[in-house]
Image: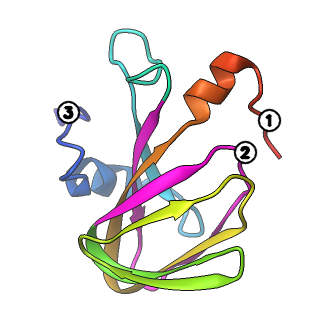
């Protein structure tokens, strides 16, 4: 069988498996968790990999957590609170709390690595879904 405990900087293999069962209008996303507990790897930070399908335009829901996205592969653009940022492999962008975010993959599929502070906010009792 295929393991989902992959190198976070090479997310294509486990995400490709998830893409086969994820609706086309949704993000293909894999959260990295402690395999023994199912909880985040660290008590203060959450880690996940995201695949944006070629040509996909995806609006994310507002979140109270701030985040950092690193582009592992592909190119595209992100609109964050009305500001459009072009990105390609090796770029890193930040997402402030409560931001309106939209990602667009251009050309081929894009793979993003995402880190956020949602686990810390949950531990402090201040995380709220919108």
Who comes first in sequence, dot 2 or dot 3? 3
Q: Where residue 111 is drawn, which disc sits there?
A: none
Magenta span contains residue 68? yes
Q: Residue shown at 71%/82% (left/top)?
A: 82
Q: Quadrant of residue 126?
A: top right
Q: Quadrant of residue 40?
A: top left
Q: How much space separates mark 1 and mark 2, taking CA atoms?
A: 7 Å
Q: Position of residue 18 (x, y in %)?
A: 38, 50
Secondary structure state at the residue bearing disc 3 = loop
- Tell me the magenta residue range: 45-71
In front of the other: 67 or 11 = 67
Q: Quadrant of residue 81?
A: bottom right
Front position among marks 2 and 3: 2
Mark 3 residue crowding within 10 angstroms, few (<14) / some (14–19) / many (20+): few
Q: Residue shown at 18%/37% (left/top)?
A: 2
Q: Position of residue 1 (x, y in %)?
A: 16, 32
For disc 1, the marked residue is 128
């Amino acid at each position: 069988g295929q393991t989902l405990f992959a190198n976070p900087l090479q997310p294509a293999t486990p995400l490709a498996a998830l893409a086969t069962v994820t609706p086309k209008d949704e993000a293909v996303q894999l959260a990295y968790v402690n395999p023994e507990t199912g909880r985040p790897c660290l008590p203060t930070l959450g880690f996940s990999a995201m695949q944006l399908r070629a040509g996909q335009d995806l609006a994310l829901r507002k979140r109270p957590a701030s985040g950092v996205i690193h582009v592992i592969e592909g190119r595209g653009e992100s609109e964050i609170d009305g500001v459009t940022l072009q990105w390609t492999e090796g770029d890193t962008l930040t997402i402030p709390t409560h931001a309106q975010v939209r990602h667009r993959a251009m050309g081929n599929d894009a793979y993003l690595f995402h880190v956020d502070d949602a686990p810390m906010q949950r531990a402090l009792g201040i995380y709220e879904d919108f």
